[in-house]
Amino acid sequence: MLRALFIYLSESRHLRAVAERSAIGQRMSSRFVAGTQPEDVLRAALAVNQLGMGVSIDNLGENVTNADEARASAQLYHHLLDEIAVRELDANISVKLTHMGLDVDPNLATEQVTRLVAKAAAMTPRNFVRVDMEGSPYTQRTLDFVHHLHSMPGNRGCVGAVIQSYMRRSESDIEKLLADGIRIRLCKGAYKEPPEVAFQKKSEVDANYVKLMKILLKSDVYHGLATHDENIINQAKAFATRESIPRDHFEFQMLHGIRRDLQQSLVREGWRMRVYIPFGTEWYPYLMRRLAERPANVFFIARNLLRR
């Protein structure tokens, strides 16, 4: 019920406009979004690095409507990669294909992300581009794109995909990605999907996450487990220990501003941790989808809004 509500809210243009102008909305966003400018997110990345954690930077936005917007988005990511190198940050970037112009011109999106991956691969040390997953109409195109990019000379290991455990097709998609040695971020999923496409019950989504997680950890590829679910995290830790999987063979991933205590606890225990840090003005749909992923976060946000 709550999940469906937050997905609905994420798609409301009117509520988005009201929220982004309101004082309480801006206060909410400041906890979970690094800021609106590149310097804001770079400063946040350094602070997270100093706590012993890596970073994935996301410039919020999707479904751009013209080529100029898409090119501006790509240019910003080029700037971020340059700054990551200059500042010697432990950080990579996450991009959405619709933010790179997929809906405007697929060839434009292909050209722009190809250039970003080539740049990441040429850096010293080599960097990494995560191609984010969007709603099911984009799933196959996104995966085809990642497979193609990864197969290009010099790109191996520098581009990865996201798999959502609520999608019924995910196990098959993982098998194909692993066959090509492609790195995967496993998350639960946060878009409204019909029952024939995605599991609807939380118990089913969680069970599939654990099943897919075990497949990833047993592979020879470095993956990210993106979850704040302490039960699942404990299952991952127990499985890795039982199967003698080294702690540097994979990483946990969490969102900026959520469960900082758990993030730092995992680091102290010797597990790898990466924090996904978004920035930009388009924070409202991002925050609503994060609440849809885990409605319990609404109570977490309410508690934190009362703190100074």
Image (cartoon, rainbow, N blue to C red):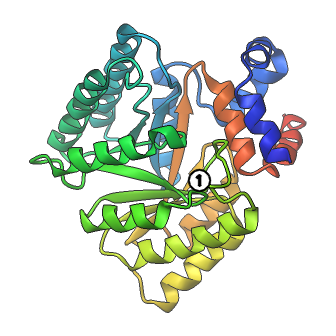
Tell me if I can see residue 185 in this picture: yes
As drawn, 14 above or below 225: above
**Picture coordinates of residue 116 (x, y %)?**
25, 32
For label 1, the residue is 197
User: Quick check: 274 left or right of 125?
Assistant: right
As drawn, 234 above or below 132: below
Q: Farthest residue toward the left? A: 153
Of the pair 94 and 208, the residue shown nearer to us: 208
Task: Name the residue: 30% across, 59% down.
Answer: 182
As drawn, 71 above or below 197: above
Identity of the amino acid at label 1? Val
**Picture coordinates of residue 106 (x, y %)?**
31, 26
**Picture coordinates of residue 239 (x, y %)?**
54, 84
Task: Name the residue: 51% across, 71% down.
Answer: 213
**Picture coordinates of residue 147 (x, y %)?**
26, 50
Q: Quadrant of the C terminus?
A: top right
Residue 66, by quadrant, is top left
